[in-house]
Image (cartoon, helix red, strand yellow):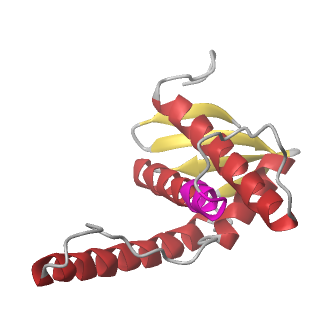
Amino acid sequence: MKLVRHNKAGRAYLLNENEAASLRSLLQQFPITANVPAQISKTDADPEAMEREKLLNESLAEHRKELKKQATNLLAAKKFKEVQKSYLLTLTPEEHEILLQILNEIRVGSWRVLGEPEDLEPEVPPQSEREWVFYNLMELAGYFEASLLRALDGDLQPGHE
């Protein structure tokens, strides 16, 4: 994945066939995990704290629902334009931010499913097929997230606008 254009209107990335297929697959599967309720406090049983927690969870559920809708929009044919054996992905600044949020949700959700491991590169490989799936989803989302964040830092390849 390589940033090839960056201007006020947005960014354009060149993806090879495997990258394009992988990113589309991630977007199609979003959300990959169930909505996990947020807990404001583990010890505070105050009715006001419980009400704040309820409002927070409602807001998070609504946000996730909106991200799902945005993931569907990012899959539109006009976003991925075939260029020879590659694909050009064009994103507005808002879509760029939304894609980062979706990828982060996938990465963090997979990490939670794996039991929130401290070591993201375990010495012992995942033991079950389910662990392999979520480990790979976490890694793949991380790859795309890192590529998009590098682009924010201005790692534009020489010779492009």
On the rendered structure, is 51 left or right of 156? left
Count of numbered marks: 0
User: From what the image shows, is residue 20 above or below residue 131?
Assistant: above
User: From what the image shows, is residue 25 above or below residue 35?
Assistant: above
In the rendered image, the quadrant that contains the N terminus is: top right
The prevailing secondary structure element of the residues shown in magenta is: helix
Residue lying at the far front of the rendered structure:
43
111 vs 9, nearest the viewer: 111
On the rendered structure, is 10 left or right of 27? left
Residue lying at the far top of the rendered structure:
158
Residue 94 x, y percent position in the rendering: 40, 54
The magenta stretch spans residue 34: no
10 vs 149, nearest the viewer: 149
Residue 85 x, y percent position in the rendering: 88, 45
18 vs 58, nearest the viewer: 58
Q: Residue at x 63, y 60 (%)?
A: 110
Q: Residue at x 75, y 43 (%)?
A: 15
Q: Residue at x 63, y 31 (%)?
A: 4
**Dividing the picture into quarters, in which one does residue 27 lie?**
bottom right
Q: Residue at x 62, y 49 (%)?
A: 117
In the rendered image, the quadrant that contains the C terminus is: top right
Residue 144 x, y percent position in the rendering: 64, 44
What's the magenta region? 106-115
Residue 31 x, y percent position in the rendering: 59, 72
The magenta stretch spans residue 113: yes
